[in-house]
Amino acid sequence: MTQLVLVTYDWVPEPPRGLVRDLRVRWALEEAGLPYRVESTPFEDRPAEHIAHQPFAQVPWLTDGDVSVFESGAVLLYLAEKSEALMPKGARPEATEWVFAALNSVEMATQPWVLFHFWGVDSGPAREQFDNFVKLRLDRMEPVLAEREWLVAGQFGVADILMADVLRVVDKFDGLKAHPACKAYVDRATARPAFQKAHADQLAHFAAADAARA
Amino acid sequence: MTQLVLVTYDWVPEPPRGLVRDLRVRWALEEAGLPYRVESTPFEDRPAEHIAHQPFAQVPWLTDGDVSVFESGAVLLYLAEKSEALMPKGARPEATEWVFAALNSVEMATQPWVLFHFWGVDSGPAREQFDNFVKLRLDRMEPVLAEREWLVAGQFGVADILMADVLRVVDKFDGLKAHPACKAYVDRATARPAFQKAHADQLAHFAAADAARA
């Protein structure tokens, strides 16, 4: 009986498809080979039930019986306790620090930069400062990723899912050209069958919603 | 014998004093009553030893014998395993989700907004978008904080240290005026003796460095 339920939107517009954060959770579940099912919550008119599970009215969240967890970082650390494919025994402190490095050091610089692209903020002092901030973070990640295949304990894990997902979006906007080790890391992470399946499943999920609306 | 060592800069310029992230770790250690000592690493000319502990050349990091942990979020979750004053038994999933909510949902909006204040970005499309983004997050936190004293399991803990520290900086720039429950939460968190001591200790640490330089 499948107990793990991943909840995402029933539909999203075209631009964020392939980027919605349920992808991080799908990827982890596929890497671990944990059985799960996907349920939908309305993108438009988000009900109180949604806010009860995710107070920012975003997705994803995961339920595991009576336990409900939101925030992709928290969901991945929760799943990591269930599978050594996501975090080897004894590696919790190191895995945790790199999960936060992805989400609070690197994404803290890259997400505003990505949003500026979506919003058409092509110049000005804010854009220039964030161009520099992104470069500062990538300059620090470059030697780390040049000397190791994966971030923690010599094996792929939850920190890689998050770091690669963060850097993948930078790459979409041609932001890794001066950082070949970061680019190679994104390429080898996204070549994994679990990423490929997670990505295809997300696209198929939203495409099915289009068909249902048509 | 004190095994926990918190490492921060030997000195910082005036503007970030009271905001350096070692404060989050000091606060947690004081709440838990865990013995620790503070060591310094040079703010200028950061040595390779620094990068070995903190690959982004930032502070803080914590050592516990052979274990070394960076990222304030990871350090607090690490300390939470040592003290029920920081996280009650069985509350790990819920504490973890709120830690990420503070650092990846709320601070993701507020840190750029705070940086714009430091950088003098007072107008323009980037500033307007982030004014809206901060409001969106605070609008979601307001009902949460109106109905509970602390975020997790009815007691103060690591998620409150991080959320209150994130919101405290917004308050410094008068950003909580339309969100009284957020403001009241910051006030009751920062009234705690452990915060007061942590804050005074950070200011004293950097003031001592001024004296040594004079």
Image (tube, coloured by chain):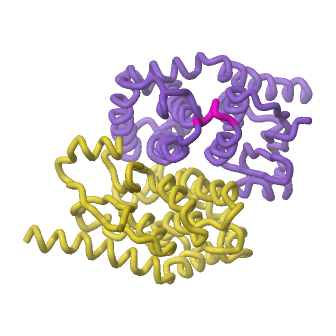
Chain colours: A yellow, B purple
Image point 70% across, 29% down: which residue? B32
Name the side, left or right, on which A4 lies relative to B113: left
Image point 17% across, 47% down: which residue? A45
Image point 21% across, 74% down: which residue? A207
Main SS category, magenta section: loop
- Seen in the picture, residue A30 relative to B186 is either above or below; the reply is below
Name the side, left or right, on which B6 lies relative to B143: right
Name the side, left or right, on which A119 lies relative to B174: left
- Seen in the picture, residue A64 relative to B182 is either above or below; the reply is below
- Please state the extent of the stretch shown in magenta in the rendering: B83-88
Quadrant that contains the C terminus of chain B: top right
Q: Nearer the viewer, residue A204 or B108?
A: A204
- Seen in the picture, residue A104 relative to B198 is either above or below; the reply is below
Residue A181, located in which quarter of the rendered image?
Answer: bottom right
Residue B83, located in which quarter of the rendered image?
Answer: top right
Q: Position of residue B20 (x, y in %)?
A: 68, 35
Residue B143 seen: yes
Q: Which of A178 and B7 is in front in this view?
A: B7
Q: Position of residue B212 (x, y in %)?
A: 92, 27
- Seen in the picture, residue B140 relative to B145 is either above or below; the reply is below
